[in-house]
Image (tube, coloured by chain):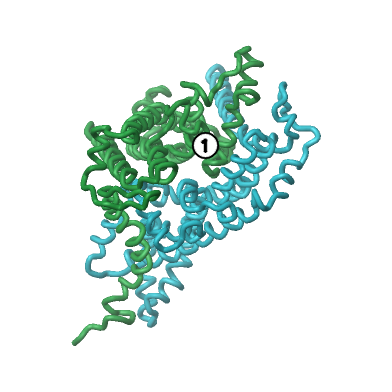
Amino acid sequence: MKKKLFGDKGLLTPYLYLLPHAVFFTIFAFYPVFKGLWISLHRWDVLSGEKSFVGFKNYIDIFLRRNVPAQYYWEALWNTIQFVIYSVPFLVGIALILALLINSVKKGKGFFRTVFFLPTALTVSVVAVIWRWIFNYESGLLNYILYSLFKIKNIPWLTQQPGAWISIVVTTIWWTVGWNMIYFIIGLQNIPEELYEAAKIDGASWWQTFRYITLPSLKPITLFIFVTTVIASFNLFGQSQLMTGGGPGRSTVTVMLHIYNEGFGTNLRMGSASAMAYLTALIMIIVTFIQVRFFTRSE
Amino acid sequence: MINHKLKKIILNISLYVIIIFLGIIWIFPIYWMFITSLKPEYETIAWPVKWIPYPPILENYLKILGNPVDTPVFLWFKNSLIAAFSYSFLGLIVSTLAAYAFSRMKFPGRDKYFWFLVSFMTIPGIIYLIPNYLTINTFGWVDDIKSIIFPGLASVWGIFMLRQYFITIPYELDESAKIDGANSFYILWKIIIPLSKPALLTLGFMNFLSNWNDYLWALICLSSPEKRTLPVGIVTLQGRYIHFYGTMMAGAFLVSFPAIILFVFIQRYYIRGVIMTGFGGR
């Protein structure tokens, strides 16, 4: 007997349910992976309208630092790595401290959780505008507080290093640490109560309980938080673009900002921008892989 | 014994002191934005600073709202609302249909296709900017709100989350409905969807807020002032009023106020979403 294709028991029915997503997925997620690779093998200038196949020339140019954008790419990559190093320990550490604090208070858990989670509801341009104002050189709030409390003269936060990095790191912590805090709170709540009771009976101190029960139980969620935070920090864009404009000099131009400038901002060279994007994606995947290996090896 | 109790009380109090202190620091930038927006410009830059403006003025808000040609805030608001609402609504439909097939139907290649989709979640988003922009360009969607709505529907995250939820709904419900002669769409509409309201609300809200706050993609796709969404509209404001802090803060407050209110009400759905999937949508 021939099986039906359509209708409720039809062979094709499940695929019809998948079809709407598959259409968008194919156009905007599957196809662009290959299209982007294809573009990266071209000289693809929007301004001159030139589109010619050049093979791996864009990649070779980047590696041999043959032109200015290629030289700037490595500089931007190094800037981005610096930001990852400066920001990730705080984004993870402060999140853990906040989660532990919220977990220990008896009243107002929900309220405090909302307070620290709230900034994540803001869009990056608003966050940048607020903190630009706070870090303002002449009349910013921070310089005012520093002057009235410690008689410290105005600091040009956004136009000098290390002030520029400090500003961006502080802003990023304020904006996104709530996410990590939520993950830690959930991780803490998942630790079985019996473990703590057993520790209490054994007369373990606060530190011992923390060191031998809390921390090991948080290991899986910490791996996840670490990996996602490194990726998020690698994607730094809005804060640099809107707060420091990549300056002073080019010291806060990140990879994202550089690729944006190369592809969309000033140069409109999509071929080389695409090559940089693929190279960056590869680096990110490798970094993620190393972290996962590092965390899981010692088990 | 008393000593021990006293120690506990002191510990408790210091705990609250620390968390309240940190809480004030965390809220202060938002307070500062609001307060600055209520000051006349000469007062925003005055030292010593005024912690509470007296009298508060609305001049800065009128300045922004009263200039619909250069800073059409209401248009940006409308654009943001249309984009975020359409995206979250269409996202729910697309993800629900797919998650339903993945969780309740048997068909060749189901698991392979599912993991194929999930594997795409590990691809860094950076490689999508240029090819997707060119696709949008081919469709004639540059500087059009469609560019903010449709590409995100390719996301796999919603399917992943809803599938996790759908498989917890007992299969007996489907079976008994099938005996009564219900077809698959009827089961989805009358059984699965009503029972999945919390998960659907979570996904809807998360999609809404992520679209509402999207910056980089909107910056690339929308160029003319009247087509912009709020996050990029703020940049227009910054270009115009960069040294007018009262006005800037009024703009920032107008943009963030709806998001803040919405967020206070829906954050528990966010947290539920994180618990449901084991990770949030970031």
Q: Of residues A206 and A5, which is closer to you in this image?
A: A5
Q: Of residues B152 and A263, which is closer to you in this image?
A: A263
Seen in the picture, residue A75 relative to B108 is either above or below; the reply is: above
**Residue linked to disc 1:** A242
Residue neighbourhood size for the residue with mark 1, other residues' Cα within 10 Å, grouped as few (<14), some (14–19), many (≥20): some
State the image coordinates of residue A149 (x, y, percent, origin top left): 64, 15
Residue at the left extreme, as displayed: A1
Q: Of residues B97 and B187, which is closer to you in this image?
A: B97
Seen in the picture, residue A46 relative to A21 is either above or below; the reply is: above
State the image coordinates of residue B90 (x, y, percent, origin top left): 47, 64
Q: Is residue B50 left or right of residue B127?
A: right
What chain is tagged by disc 1?
Answer: A
Residue drawn at x 44%, y 39% is: A237
Tint of chain B: cyan
Residue drawn at x 34%, y 56% is: A29
Q: Is residue B157 left or right of residue B144?
A: left
- Spot the green chain and give its letter: A
Secondary structure of the residue carrying tag 1 is helix
State the image coordinates of residue B78 (x, y, percent, origin top left): 61, 57
Residue A191 showing in the rendered view: no
- Please tell me in which quadrant of the rendered image residue A90 appears: top left
State the image coordinates of residue A65 (x, y, percent, origin top left): 27, 32
Residue at the right extreme, as displayed: B55
Residue A129 showing in the rendered view: yes
Seen in the picture, residue A252 relative to B263 is either above or below; the reply is: above
Q: Of residues A94 and B254, which is closer to you in this image?
A: B254
- Please tell me in which quadrant of the rendered image residue B114 appears: bottom left
Q: Of the residues shown, which amino acid type is indicated by label 1?
A: Leu
